[in-house]
Amino acid sequence: MSSAVKIYQEKTIEAMGHMERKVKKELIDGIWYMSPTAGIYHGIVVGNLQKIFGPKLWGRGCLTFSENLEVYYNNDNNYVIPDFAIVCNRNFFKDRGVDTAPDFVVEVLSPTSAKRDKTIKKAKYEMLGVKEFWLISVGDRSVEVYLLVDVKYELANVYAVPYDWQIERMDEAELAEIVYIFNMSVFDGLEVDVRDVFENLE
């Protein structure tokens, strides 16, 4: 390699290092919220959701989206971007998103956006009428399932995958109470194994 090429590569790498990282921008009630690029474990979980729901929804006319769907509200002046969403009604698609409630939404909690996901965005999904909403904690390996009941979210259940050290400390009664497989409310006959949500995290 010539010295000129080497110097060019070094300068290019240095310049790339100073470039602004890609951020997710959301306009919620007239306020801009920006989140940095999600971490690797966050990405693994979102990828797992794609693998879980893609085959199960094949032939139902539903589409899955990972962090690239703008959900508009308030006369299209505001929008939120779910970490994962499923939309079955294609009549409301716009250039960059939809102006109707997705059928199903997931937020994977991150240190920089956990409070917003649990409060502001959860309230918006409730207002929009998203029928089923999940909050996923990577650290706890848990899924909180919220269902829309009379225009309000109710916590239907919490499903978790214990770590090996936790299982070792459980007695038979506690182990018997663990539920890994459950049926979704929003999609008839669609069964989910919560262990698949956290696959490849170890």
Image (spheres, rainbow, N blue to C red):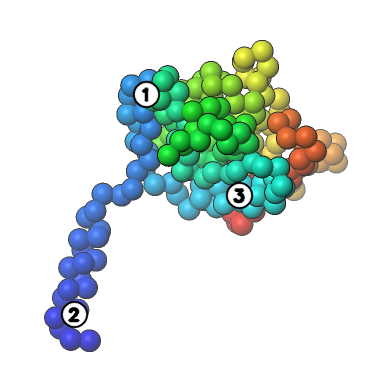
- Residue at x 17% of width, y 68% of height: 11
Q: At which x and y percent is residue 186? A: 70, 31
Q: Is residue 58 above or below residue 79?
A: below
- Residue at x 46% of width, y 35% of height: 94
Q: Tell me which amino acid carries mark 1.
A: Asn
CA distance for labels 3 and 1: 29 Å
Residue 60 shown left or right of residue 8 in the figure: right
Q: At which x and y percent is residue 9? A: 22, 73
Residue 189 shown left or right of residue 87 in the figure: right
Quarter of the image with the C terminus in it: bottom right
Image mark for residue 77:
1
- Residue 105: in sight, yes or no? no
Q: At which x and y percent is residue 177? A: 81, 35
Q: Which residue is label 2 attached to?
A: 5
- Label 3: how many residues lie within 10 Å, few (<14), some (14-19) or many (20+)? some
CA distance for labels 3 and 2: 41 Å
* Residue that lies at the very extreme toward the bottom in this rendered image: 1
Q: Is residue 130 above or below residue 184?
A: above
Residue 195 shown left or right of residue 111 in the figure: right
Q: Earlier in the sequence, mark 3 or mark 1?
A: 3
- Residue at x 62% of width, y 19% of height: 153
- The residue closer to the viewer here, 89 or 113, is 89
**Tag in front: 3 or 1:** 1
- The residue closer to the viewer here, 190 or 42, is 190
- Quarter of the image where one finds residue 154: top right
Determine whether label 1 and label 2 are within 8 Å by CB. Answer: no
Q: Which residue is label 3 attached to?
A: 50
- Residue at x 22% of width, y 86% of height: 1
- Residue 29: in sight, yes or no? yes
* Residue that lies at the very extreme toward the top in this rendered image: 150
- Quarter of the image where one finds residue 143: top right
- Local secondary structure at mark 1: loop
